[in-house]
Image (cartoon, rainbow, N blue to C red):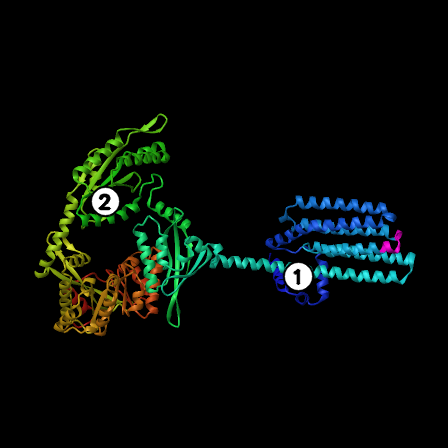
Amino acid sequence: MKAAGKDHERLYRTSDNLGNVLTQYRGFGPFLVSMFKNIYKINPVDPAISTIKAHILHSFAPIFAVLQLIVAFCLTFFLWDVSGSVASISLIFTAILIIALSAYFFFVKEQHLMRAPAIYVLRLFALCLGIFWVTILVTIFPKESDIGQLIACLLVMALMASAVLFLPVAGASALFSAVVGLGTCAVILYDWAKFHHETLYLLGAIIFFIYTCIVVLSCALIRELLIGYLIKRYYLEQRNAILTLLLGDTSDIAGDWLWETDDEGALTGVSPSFKHALNVQEDVLYEQPFVEIMLQKASQNKGKSFFEDMERLKECLEQRLFFRDLIVEVQKENETRYWSLSGRPLFQDQKFVGYRGVGTDVTHIHNIHRKASFRARHDEMTNLPNRTAFFDDMEFYLVEAEQSQEVFALLNIDLDGFKSVNDQYGHHAGDYVLSQIAITLNKILGEGDTLYRIGGDEFVLINKKTSKEKANLIAQDLIKAITSKPITIKEGASWTPGVSIGIVLTKGGMETVTDLLAASDLALYEGKKRGGNCAVFFDSELETLAQRKLSLLRDLSLALDEGEISLRYQPFYDAQTQKLRGFEALLCWKHSLYGRILTEQIITIAEESGLIQKLGLFVLAKATEFAASWPEHLILSINLSPGQILRKDFINEWLIVLDGTKFPPHRLQIEVTETIFMKQSAATFAKLHKLRDRGMAIALDDFGKGFSCLGYLYFFPFSKIKLDRLFIRDMLRDQRAATIVKGIVNLAVDLSISLTVEGVESREQYDYIVGLGCSEVQGFFFAGPLPPKTVIQLISKSGEIVQ
């Protein structure tokens, strides 16, 4: 097909005019050689181009046959007196030709006409047809009068002209024309030499020879131009199809509508298709604002999403904002439709002059997405909401219960002995049993109850606005409904299910979905221990968890006042030289009842109790007072929480502490996480800039753990990024984690930002990090959080002098 591609490229370039054709062949000589080579050679052809050629040939065939028949009729009519039998033979043969040609094109499929066997057949057909007409001419020419011979020559010239209908088949038209024309010349010359000896006959033979050459060359040249034109048209159609696919078609045919408004929001122009879709009278269409017209077309099912969409459209138009693919719900002919609207504000000389946009009916796509969303949130076998839907809905239920202080129950339902069904009868039988259980459970549901399938044979029922007594009653009804009637699996085989139910009652608050589900699991397995077919309430474990949190909230303030909270310092090192660079201050609290409390838990409790500012100032004062005795080049790193930076007097309080401890700001590094930018980002950036102007370094901590928005690196000049231990833990065994680490290291290098890798716990991890060109490392491979006494010893061993 490579040769075919070159041939098509040549034809594409030569399709404009005759000069280009001869230029490509470098004159008439090579062109003639190429033309006669086509008589016996078949060039490789692109299938698509072959189809075009075959279609043309298929269309020309009837015309060619009819022309042959017309010539035969004319021959019979004009020459019947002298050559009646021969003319009759030509007429009969031509009729047979038409039948044979029609049969051939009928039985040979169009897509096969340009294949090698069919091409050879067509060339042979052209050759035989030319020989036939020459034979007819040889038979009748000597018998005819001068007028009859002239008529015969004219008919032959007409026959030769019909050769253009063979153009799609390379060589066929030239072959037919050459055989008929040269044969005719030979007949005239023979007649001149043997009978007439007149100069006129010799001149006629020469003229006919010239005519034959012109016809043969014309057929070849016209074929080049025609096929080149068709190839060019084919490629242009292909290109347009690709552009249409890539760019889309904004015409009305494609289903898109055009609309335009003035500076007051009234429509000034709409496409006919949009006018038809709106179905609004012309005088109303151009008088009311666009939003008002859309409200009139709005769906009667005006839910929350409808008002949000319309409000968004109104807001965009009023504030002159660009919007794209805004979905609005409309009512058209008692049918709910969904339209996608996009618009761009127009300005002339910096003056707003209106909107221009497009709209599309996306009902079909919207319904597909809605069905896909339904499938994503529902179990295919039972058609119940699935685990994803359960977790999504539970978040809402918890908030709702906390606000209303109404109790709801989570009933965790698990079938006893279900595994035996799959083992004995197969998974198909197990699926059938689950579908029947789902039907049974659905019949028990009351108003406001929701049933989910969250696992293999595990269901969850949410019973809202309930009490312990009501929840227990529902559980007993469920047990009775499930266990009272055997399920027929197949003829002669049935199974009576058993069931255990774990119940959790809650009003929302501090519990999470995972906590509630775990608590219901504990109650569920307690029910299984009791033999099944029972419901067990969970209370003590969840109560203990809540009491622990309340106890920590209460004890934190006392711990601060009585000095139970201390600081530990974890060192970080230069990754290339292993020299000590500084320490990160970390909170340490050993509770008398609950043991060691993690730093993250201490900060969370402090923020919830309102003690975060007091705790932050305590850490700053304690850490800077101790770090003031370190060597000048060692850095102290302190974590800053969102609760601290949101205070208005935050910076003044910090500067007062630093003045009191005499700790130089340029040795202080403040670590912030991405969550600090989630609220009041402008004020946050301003405060961080003030700290940086005082000489403090700002580091982005736990990079990669949260949102990892690169916009933070763009808007604020951080001096350091601290890569979270999550990726370091897995980078030696997970290629994706390794790729992320490499990418972040390269990002830090390109931004000229120092990078500290946290969580380095082995020699292999350290060697890998060093190889990437990381700046600093921190982790248990070097040391964990250390008490102040051990810090002094470590600095001394490093050859530093502690003041």
Q: Mark 1 falls on what kind of element?
A: helix
Can you identify the residue that label 1 sits on?
Answer: 225
The amino acid type found where label 2 is placed reads Leu
**Where is residue 406, by image quadrant?**
top left
Judge the density around disc 1: few (<14), some (14-19), many (≥20) Cα neighbours within 10 Å: many
Give the residue at x 10% y 53%. Answer: 592
**Going by the picture, which residue comes out furthest to the top?**
492
Of residue 779 and residue 238, the one placed in the foreground of this image is 238
Which residues, given as a range, are shown in magenta?
142-149
- Residue 223 position, x and y percent, is 68, 59
Q: Answer left or right for 536 relative to 9.
A: left
The amino acid type found where label 1 is placed reads Leu
Residue 331, placed above or below residue 236: above
Is residue 148 on the magenta stretch?
yes
Is residue 244 on the magenta stretch?
no
- Does any portion of residue 529 appear in the rendered image? no
- Residue 709 position, x and y percent, is 31, 62
Q: Answer left or right for 586 relative to 328.
A: left
**Going by the picture, which residue comes out furthest to the left?**
562
**Where is residue 609, by image quadrant?**
bottom left
Q: Quadrant of the N terminus?
A: bottom right
Of residue 266 and residue 720, the one placed in the foreground of this image is 266
- Residue 450 position, x and y percent, is 26, 41
Identify the disc placed on residue 517: 2
Give whichever of discs 2 and 1 has the lower sequence position: 1
In this rendering, the count of numbered labels is 2
- Does any portion of residue 578 appear in the rendered image? yes
Give the residue at x 75% y 54%. Answer: 176
